[in-house]
Each structure stands twice: as structure tokens, then as C-alpha cells.
Image: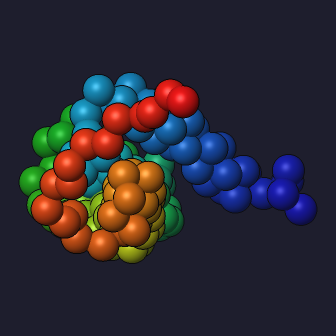
Amino acid sequence: MLTSDSMSLLWLTYLGLSLIVLVSGYLGLAFLPRLLRLPITWAVAGILWMPTRFRLPLVEEGEFYTGMAPAVVVAAIAVLERNASVLMSSGLLVAAGALLGMALGILQVWLLRAGGAPEQEAKERNRDERKGRKQDNNRRREGHGGGQPHAPRKRREPRVG
């Protein structure tokens, strides 16, 4: 059951808190263009969500507890314990998570930009067509029938009587 297994509850809590951090970070970076905002947010997501294995010594000699944890947490504990070998492996995983997240963010920016381009082209085409129709209407109104303008005609004054 979910409530009786503390590790799965711990992971779900971590996932929920990391999502809150990511959403608030994304909204906090609203002053940046999307080109920078998405890769930064995905890089932080890669750092937060990259898992790694860890091993802790227990009270009794020769016994260890082995499990999974976020690599950034394992790296932080390795810094506090001054454990260089664990810091090297978990630090490399943190860097790999950041690079993978940044790559996903750049891919997302590229897909959003590529997906929006046809819509933008269609809007510009419609605007140009409307502008062309408006010019054609003016030409017809002037008596040119929508074709190329002819030589100017002599002005005719109205007659009374």
C-alpha cells in the first residue's frame, strides 16, 4: 500500500515538491524569452530528477543500506561527508542530467518554433491577400477594373441643365 511503504511515499513527495519548484522557477523566469526559459527550466528538471544508487553504512560492522536517491541529494551528502569518489560519480550524473534536460528544452523550443512557423506564414499570407483585395477594390472604384492603372483620363465636370 502507498501509505505503508515509506520509500514510495518519499519519492512521490519529492516529485510533487520538485514540480512546484519547476513551475515556480519557470514563472519566475518570465522576463526571459522562451528560447532561454525552457532550456534553463529543463536543465533544473534534469538535475532534480536524475536518480542514482547510494550505499550507507549501518551501525553494525560490515552491513550497508543500498537504495536509490536523486543524484543531487547524494552529491550534497558526499560534499558534507567529504567523500570524493561518491561525489565524482553523483556529480557526473548531475551534470549529465543538466545537459540532458537542456537538450530537451532546446528540442522543445525548436519544435514549438517549427510548429508555429506555418501558422505565422498563413497569417501573413491572409494579411497580404486582404491587403491586395483592398487595393483591387480601390482600383475598381477608380474605374480601372482591378487591372494595371491606365493613363490618367481627362477630368469631367458635372453639368446642370
Q: Is residue 85 left or right of residue 73?
A: left
Examine the rendering and report whether any part of residue 142 can be seen: yes
- In the picture provided, is 52 more to the left or to the right than 149? right
Q: Which residue corresponds to the image point at 29% horizontal and 26% vertical from the top-left?
A: 31
> Residue 113, percent across and down?
32, 64
Q: Which residue is at a point 39% across and 68% down the rendered structure image? A: 145
Residue sitting nearer the eye, 16 or 129:
129
Residue 143 is situated, as x and y percent measured from the top left of the image, at 38, 59
Measuring from the top left, give residue 130's x and y in whole percent. 44, 58
36 relative to 21 in the view: left or right: left
Q: Nearer the viewer, residue 72 or 97?
A: 97
Quarter of the image where one finds residue 125: bottom left
Total label count? 0
Would you place residue 19 above or below residue 62 in this image? above
**Residue 50 in picture, x, y percent from top left:** 37, 62
Quadrant showing the C terminus: top right
Q: Nearer the viewer, residue 125 or 69?
A: 125
Q: Which color scheme does this rendered protein use?
A: rainbow
Residue 134 visible within the image: no
Q: Residue 37 falls in which quadrant of the image? A: top left
What residue is rendered at 16% in x and 54% in y? 152
Looking at this view, is 105 or 111 the one in front? 111
Most extreme residue toward the front, as rendered?
Answer: 161
